[in-house]
Amino acid sequence: MDHIIEINGLTKDYGDGRGIFDTNLAIRPGEVFGLVGINGSGKTTMIRHLMGFLHPDAGRCSIRGLDCWRQAAELKRGIGYIPGEVAFPDVKSRLDFFRLQAGYLGIRDFSRIHDLADRFALDASAPLKRMSKGMKQKTAIVAAFMADASIFILDEGTTGLDPLMQKVFTDLVREEKAKGRTMFMSSHMFDELEAVCDRVAFLKDGHVIEVADVSQFGGHEPVKEYKIEFTNLGDYQAFLSRSFAVAQRVESLGQVTVQATDQEIAALFTALADLEVRFIKQVPHTLARHFIEKYQETEEMEGSLHV
Amino acid sequence: MFSAALMKQTIRENSVLWLILAAVQCLMVSTIGLTTPLAAAGIAYYNMLPGIFVGIYAITIGNRLICAKVDRGTLAYVLSTPVSRRAVVATQALFFAGSLALMCTLAATVHCVAASFSSYGASSAEVQTIIKLNLGLLALALAFSGICFAASCVFNLSKHAIGLGGGVICAFLLAPLIAMFGQNFTFLRYLTIVTLYDVPGIMASATGWAWRLAGLAGVALATYAAGALAFTRKDLPL
């Protein structure tokens, strides 16, 4: 089996341009796959299809070869899920909730639950009602990972978490990835996705506008950008006379931003050796920047189509 | 087909209202059974009050079993496990019908026992009548619960489920009362399923009561089935 999660031509039209339209994605086993997009771009709709809560208008999606709608219950064996909107059943304490879920899942060994609760600093006996957003989210994370599933579907898994707990979550995702687990996670926090994902799909108005390979971002891009500031105008101009790919220049500050592949780096440093440089730094092409560029590009394209 | 874990949770969530309504009914039938002969109290009691009790139970629990879980989103935590929609709907329906059967059985038993301890005693014919009256009540309760269950399965918002289920049941319960206000309103008796629970007929040992109960059972069966079908096929905003 090449792909563990497959989305083919999936369409759900809620009218007025809302929904998802002819979306196609294929996730490999062991991959951590991210889904980003602004609010209302269709992330949750896509995830609800994977969970078998929604019936597609057209197209289909499958997990491990099982149809997400027709074989919904069957394929839930081995899936951990964090809903986009966490609402707990009517039980007293957090432990009661874990017990209830364990009952549905047929889990008898509670050691993993206690281990996870410890990691997220959760008091199992605390009452479920009147919990803060972060506390609810942490409880939902433990519930999703307690099953020791092979596939995790996480709809904005870290909303409301403090930076410390986000780190715990990221570590947990990395650990599960190391065990060969597959993750399908939506988020609007780019750094979180950049930190853990292999690939990220950009969703805009219900369309997948790009699937980006995360290894090409965050400072690992094949053509890197460097910002250099010179101490004097003479050296600044001397540098510009060389044949480097200049992306941007600010004469008043004596700053140049150049693009260079790793092969060109030696030539760059040789050229800089004779010049007086105040600083040089790499400007990583972040996922967030890429997304914003891509988003605007698509907007402009759509704009020109509508004229 | 059924989920034991869900059944346990459903019993836990709904036992309080069941206990209250069962206790009130038992209290009433034991008082009536001990103090008044069946011929005098039967029609007065069974004609109105138990119908209201099971009506309240049907409206409240009906909404809670399915629709409230969708509305609040807690059902996501059941359906993200290997429990199928079919198992959810079957388990909840089993609880609903089963809890009503238990309530009616309990009330009938208490009534029979109380009557046999009374100074009038209870003849075997009277015991039979009490059982028939409660069997009829159960049929009515199942029809009510079926209507509320179907509403609960079809709608995603509690206010809609309670609005439809509650509205229909209130109308059904009120129609015979309004029908008593004169000849012009007697037609209302034929617009409500409550008429199929023929208390005077059962008391008078008239024939045909069983057919009417079968009619109520038919309503129950149809509405439960329709609800189950709707729930397994619809989109869930979870």
Image (spheres, coloured by chain):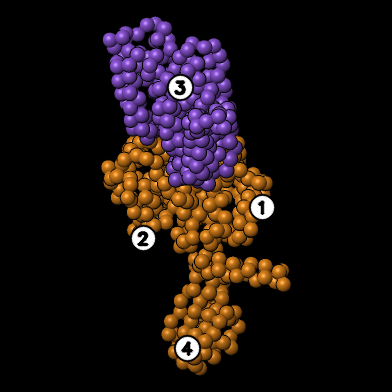
Chain colours: A orange, B purple
Horizontally, residue A70 falls left or right of residue A276, namely right
The alpha-carbon separation of the residues under discs 1 and 2 comes to: 36 Å
Labels 1, 2: front one: 1
Q: CA distance from mark 4 to mark 2?
A: 35 Å
Which residue, given by chain and number where applicable, does mark 2 sit on?
A163
Front-lying residue, A129 or A139: A129
Does any portion of residue B16 appear in the rendered image?
yes
Residue B14 image position (x, y, % from top left):
38, 33
Q: Nearer the viewer, residue A61 or B9?
A: B9
- Horizontal arrangement in the rendering, residue B62 relative to residue A61 (left or right): left
Q: Is residue B61 above or below residue B29?
A: below
Q: Which mark is residue A22?
A: 1
Camera-nearest label, 3 or 2: 3
Which of pointers 4 and 2 indicates the residue nearer the eye?
2
Upstream in sequence: badge 1 or badge 2: 1
**Which numbered mark, 1 or 3, is in the foreground of this view?**
3
Taking B11 as reference, is A244 left or right? right
How many angstroms separate mark 3 from mark 2 (CA)?
59 Å
Mark 2 is on which residue type?
Pro
